[in-house]
């Protein structure tokens, strides 16, 4: 519902990493964005990102976590240095305004939200 309020309606929810993998396998084109918790019930979100990005299933990712801001910024830098397509690592609970600002910086995501 938070994403709907921001103007995003073409969403595919997944409850865990296996569901995300299945949804990705069903599509002929990559998802524009993976919005994912770092700690998933069945795997690590970072491992999932690497797997899906390598397979060409996603273009960008935003991670959510209860970690503090400094730790998230360091993680974001490390993931980008590893070549992973991370737009941001944000604190939970999700701050809609922070997410919107990050998404609006990406031309492809902003165009699709309209």
Image (spheres, rainbow, N blue to C red):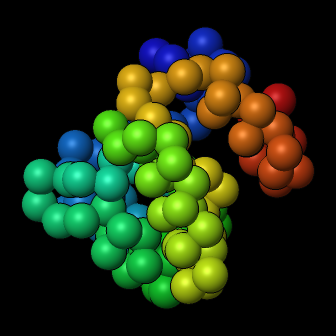
Total marks placed: 0
Q: Residue at x 11, y 60 (%)?
A: 42
User: Is 22 in front, or is 36?
Assistant: 36
Q: Residue at x 54, y 22 (%)?
A: 95
Q: Quadrant of residue 24?
A: bottom left
| Along the viewing direction, whichever of 45 and 54 lies nearer the viewer | 45
**Residue 94, percent across and down?**
47, 26
Q: Is residue 105 left or right of residue 8?
A: right
- Relative to the observer, which residue lies in front, 51 or 68? 68
Specify whether residue 18 is in view: yes
Q: Residue at x 58, y 36 (%)?
A: 10
Residue 71 lies, in percent from the top left, at 45, 53
Residue farthest left in this picture: 42
Query: Image height check: is 78 above or below 70?
Result: below
Q: Horizontal and vertical percent for residue 68?
A: 41, 41
Residue in view at x 32 percent, y 62 percent: 45
Compared across the picture, whether 59 is left or right of 14 comes to: right
Q: Residue 80, position in %: x, y? A: 62, 74
Is residue 33 something one can see in this rendering?
no
Is 35 on the left-hand or right-hand side of 104? left
For this view, does 42 lie left or right of residue 14? left
Where, quadrant-wise, is the C terminus in this rendering? top right
């Amino acid at each position: 519902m938070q994403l709907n309020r921001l103007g995003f309606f073409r969403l595919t929810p997944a409850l865990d990493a296996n569901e995300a993998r299945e949804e990705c396998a069903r599509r002929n084109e990559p998802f524009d964005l993976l919005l994912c918790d770092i700690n998933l019930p069945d795997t690590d979100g970072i491992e999932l990102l690497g797997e899906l990005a390598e397979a060409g299933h996603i273009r960008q990712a935003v991670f959510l976590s209860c970690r503090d801001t400094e730790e998230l910024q360091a993680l974001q830098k490390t993931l980008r240095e590893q070549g992973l397509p991370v737009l941001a690592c944000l604190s939970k609970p999700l701050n809609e305004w922070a997410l919107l600002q990050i998404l609006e910086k990406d031309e492809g995501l902003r165009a699709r939200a309209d």
